[in-house]
Amino acid sequence: MNGAPLPAGSMIGIIGGGQLGRMLAMAAARLGYRLTVLDPDAGCPAAQVASEIIVASYDDVGALGRLAKSCDVVTYEFENVPVEPVRAAIGVALLYPPAEALEVAQDRVVEKAFLNGIDVETAEWRAVDSIEELGHALLDLGGDCILKTRRFGYDGKGQAIIRPNGPYADAFESLGSVPSILEKKVPFAYECSVIAARGTDGAVIAYDPAENVHSLGILRRSTVPGRVSPGVAEAAKAIAARIAERLGYVGVIGVEFFVLADDSLRVNEIAPRVHNSGHWTEAACAVSQFDQHVRAIAGLPLGDPVRHSDCVMENLIGDEIGRVAELLAEPETVVHLYGKAAARPGRKMGHFTRLARR
Ligand code: ADP
Ligand code: MG
């Protein structure tokens, strides 16, 4: 689609109906589009706000085919969408971001090789397929290391820390003895992320980075600008733009960074979708990451990523949902809930953003 933008009333398909799909659906509706969600759960957060839902598993080629047929463009809200069924089914509609972005982001070895191949620095790493290879890789890298499964990790799951000279066979087995990657631990000063978007015409925008704090592998807080200096911000945005360009990307991409004490950057990972650390944009910018994603995949001009306020976004996890009444009473705080019934431990129930006008 390098021609006309998607007309109002067109149908956008989204694979995955969690909170990211829900927020995309709300942004799509604001721009006059209808939205069909494909999710195995009829009661998923996005179903409450979408026009249509197809209840099916993500690898159901028939259901993906029905989604493609009824939609003008198809997108996704998570990176573990099975690539082969999607490739087989999505012919009549367009898939944005492209399947190549999924392939890169789904496998930590492919991802790191891609990044290093375009001169983007990462942690030092080795692919590891057996306990024996893990032993060699540990000797090679030295120091504290983190073993991660190549695929399906999220929120810190599928990871094990290995200390120098510590036992390692258990670590490999505890992750299921599956193809893995060993990363040298990066002694970062802090973590940040850039949310960027690329349009069908190749235009790229990037928001200023957020400083991110994780706890138990889950994002707790994103602060903008936080500790990120203007120099680090410019460098991080340039790297995010390079990644989007080299992937022939269309849509919003999240790029997570480690920032070292000398302000040098290492990319941790990329997410081919809207990202939790970009939720602040809905409260502090005229055009949110969700709006940008819809604009990008619909062939509309991207919006200005400037913010009117500095801010702090925090997730409401599990029973923290109980803080809502108190948060609603605060001036300059934007509260966003995901419509999930059960507040299980570790489950993201919502988020809020506290604004500080500039
Ligand atoms: P996930 O897919 O679960 O987000 P990440 O690879 O982003 O997995 O790891 C989660 C967190 O663990 C990171 O945000 C960072 O705090 C820490 N971490 C991961 N890899 C490294 C590394 N090589 N060095 C230092 N910290 C790391
Ligand atoms: Mg991460």
Image (cartoon, rainbow, N blue to C red):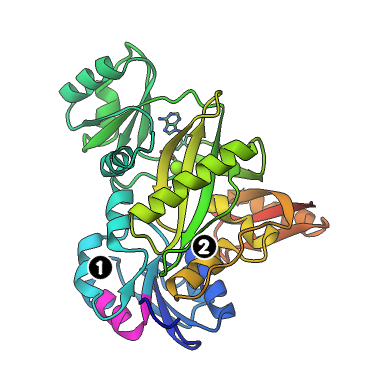
Characterize the magenta stretch by its predominant secondary structure. helix
Q: Position of residue 146 (x, y in %)?
A: 36, 27
Query: Label 2, label 1: how many angstroms apart (C-alpha)?
Result: 21 Å
Q: Position of residue 144 (x, y in %)?
A: 39, 19
Q: Please report the residue visible at 42 percent of the width from the left and 62 percent of the height from the top.
A: 77
Q: Describe residue 254's horizontal placement relative to residue 130 as left or right.
A: right
Q: Position of residue 137 (x, y in %)?
A: 24, 21
Q: Dividing the picture into quarters, in which one does residue 245 lie?
A: bottom left
* Name of the residue lying farthest toward the top: 165
Amino acid type of the residue tagged 2 in the rendering: Gln
Up/down of 299 relative to 199, above or below:
below
Q: Dividing the picture into quarters, in which one does residue 5 lie?
A: bottom left
Q: Please report the residue visible at 40 percent of the width from the left and 54 percent of the height from the top.
A: 244
Q: Could one spot residue 347 in this view of the protein?
A: no
Label 1: which residue?
86
Q: Earlier in the sequence, mark 2 or mark 1?
A: 2
Up/down of 242 relative to 287, above or below:
above
Disc on res. 252: none
Between 230 and 156, the one nearer to me in the picture = 230
Q: Describe residue 294's horizontal placement relative to residue 220 as left or right.
A: left
Rendered-image quadrant of the N terminus: bottom left
Instruction: Please state the extent of the stretch shown in magenta in the rendering.
Output: 64-73
Q: Describe residue 252's horizontal placement relative to residue 223 as left or right.
A: left
Up/down of 188 relative to 79, above or below:
above
Q: Position of residue 68 (x, y in %)?
A: 30, 79
Q: Are marks 2 and 1 in contact (CB under 8 Å)?
A: no
Label 2: which residue?
19
Question: Mark 2 Cα within 10 Å, few/some/many (few <14, many 20+)?
Answer: many
Q: Quadrant of ligand 1?
A: top left
Q: In the structure shown, which secondary structural element does the residue marked by tag 2 occupy?
A: helix
